[in-house]
Amino acid sequence: MTRPDVDPEYLTSLLNNFKAEVAGVNHVLALAGDGLLLATTPTLERDQAERLAAAASGFAGLANQVDGELTGGGLQSIIVEMAAGYLMVIQTPGGARLAAVTPANSDIGQVVYQLNLLSDRVGATALAVAARHG
């Protein structure tokens, strides 16, 4: 399922370029604030990408709850460290999220920085959370 107001080919192209340009990135996803997968790199099967999008959305939801309880400053990024790598999630100004999966030897600061630049490049409108139709 995709949103009718988002061009998945455009987002996929941006994600593929990001993966090619940022060292060590295995997978990249764009997801709506409610966890709906908007686009992914072809390095993930669709079912796997949707499960990863749901997990990233869940992490972001929990982090937003903690932020609201403690500081209220707004979620910027989440980094989940695993034995073999990292899952990084950023929240975009439009309420959507970008996620990247990298191996353990990645420069996670650089990847998060580049995800933020990608968010700026994509713009709030392409990833904005809109009302669902149907």
Image (spheres, rainbow, N blue to C red):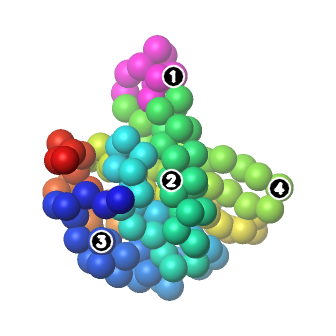
Mark 2 and mark 4: Cα distance apart in space: 20 Å
**Which residue appears at 38% of the width and 21% of the height?**
72
Give the Cα distance between marks 1 and 4: 25 Å
> Foreground residue, 75 or 129?
129
Which mark is in front, 2 or 1? 2
Residue furthest to the top in view is: 69
| x, y percent for residue 61 | 47, 33
Verify CB contact (< 8 Å) between mark 1 and mark 3: no
Q: Is residue 77 visible?
A: no
**Circle on res. 83:** 4
Marks 1 and 3: which is nearer the front? 3
Q: Position of residue 40 (x, y in %)?
A: 45, 69
Dominant secondary-structure state across the stretch colored magenta = helix
Amino acid of disc 3: Pro
- Counting from the top left corner in percent of width and height, residue 90 is at 44, 50
- Where is mark 2, residue-wise? 53
- In primary-sequence order, the first of circles 2 and 1 is 2
* Residues rendered magenta in the picture: 64-73
Q: Residues within 10 Å of mark 1 (few under 14, many from 20)?
A: some
> What is the distance, in whole Å, between disc 2 and disc 1 at their CAs?
20 Å
Pinpoint residue 46: horizontal percent, then vertical percent: 52, 68
Looking at the rendered structure, the secondary structure element under dot 4 is loop
Instruction: State whether residue 55 appears in this view.
Output: yes
Element on which disc 1 rests: helix
How many other residues sit within 10 Å of disc 4, few (<14), some (14-19) or many (≥20)?
A: few
Q: Which numbered dot is residue 8?
A: 3
**Residue beneath disc 1:** 66
